Image (spheres, rainbow, N blue to C red):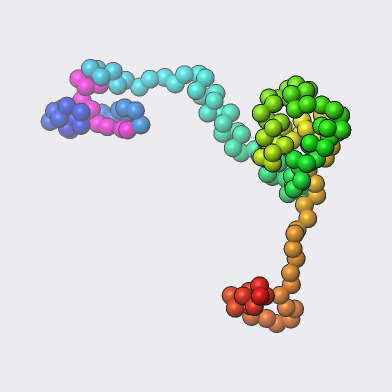
């Protein structure tokens, strides 16, 4: 015997039921009236949950962010424009050959970073390399030997 959280009935038989994302204790009258009987899950939903769990566990092979050895070239937009003009193609012609929209081509040529798949299409269609070996821009050694490490003051002195 308990209290129904939905209608407020006291000293009635209650059971725990799920309504939306919340679990409440409800009397049998409320369960029947509000049709709160447990529902079977749709088969498609079960399959989608299973496949989404698998994709979380396995890293994607072609995800460019997991590859640390290559980066998109800083001058990728100039490389694309030069290769396209070398072949005497318009942006629309290149877009058609790549099966992309002209807006994607315009955005990439203006310097907006394209998606991984579009980068691969550019490389394949234009026979160019947009992904280059990663090289650090700057290497610095503070001091060798026993050191206290770099302080904020050291940094300010180095920047002057």
Q: In which quarter of the image is the C terminus?
A: bottom right
Which of 139 and 37 lies nearest the eye of the viewer? 139
Residue at 35%, 22% in the rendered image? 38
**Which of the two residues, 65 or 103, is positioned nearer the viewer here?**
103
Judge from the rendering whether residue 50 lies leftward or rightward of residue 58; answer left or right. Answer: left
- Give the farthest residue toward the bottom: 146
- The image quadrant that residue 9 belongs to is top left
Instruction: Relative to 31, say whether 62 is above or below.
Output: below
Number of dots carrying numbers:
0
Asked if residue 29 is among those painted magenta in the image, a careful observer would answer yes
Task: Please state the horizontal and vertical placement of residue 156, each as a whole percent of the image.
Answer: 62, 75
- Of 82 and 130, which appears nearest the observer? 82
User: What secondary structure characterizes most of the magenta part?
Assistant: strand
Q: Where is residue 115 in the image (x, y as percent from the top left)?
A: 68, 35
**Is 66 inside the magenta-drawn segment?**
no
Q: In the figure, 130 relative to 124: above or below? A: below
Work out which quarter of the rendered image holds the N terminus and state it: top left
Q: Give the range drawn in magenta.
A: 22-31
Q: Residue at x 21, y 22 (%)?
A: 30
What is the x, y in percent for residue 27? 20, 25
Q: Residue drawn at (77%, 52%), measured in percent from left and top?
A: 134
145 and 110: which is toward the camera? 110
Which residue of the protein is positioned furthest toward the left in this rendering?
10
- At 17% from the left and 32% from the top, the residue drawn is 3
């Amino acid at each position: 015997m308990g209290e129904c959280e939905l209608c407020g009935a006291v000293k009635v038989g209650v059971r725990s039921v799920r309504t939306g994302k919340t679990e409440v204790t409800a009397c049998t009258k409320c369960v029947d009236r509000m049709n709160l009987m447990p529902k079977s899950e749709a088969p498609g939903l079960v399959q989608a949950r299973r496949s989404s769990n698998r994709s979380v566990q396995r890293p994607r092979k072609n995800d460019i962010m997991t590859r640390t050895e290559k980066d998109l070239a800083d001058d990728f937009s100039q490389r694309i424009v030069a290769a396209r003009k070398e072949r005497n193609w318009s942006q629309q012609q290149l877009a058609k050959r790549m099966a992309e929209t002209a807006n994607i081509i315009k955005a990439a040529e203006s310097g907006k970073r394209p998606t991984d798949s579009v980068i691969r299409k550019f490389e394949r269609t234009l026979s160019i390399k947009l992904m280059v070996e990663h090289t650090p821009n700057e290497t610095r050694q503070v001091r060798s030997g026993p050191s206290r490490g770099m302080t904020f003051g050291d940094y300010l002195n180095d920047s002057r």
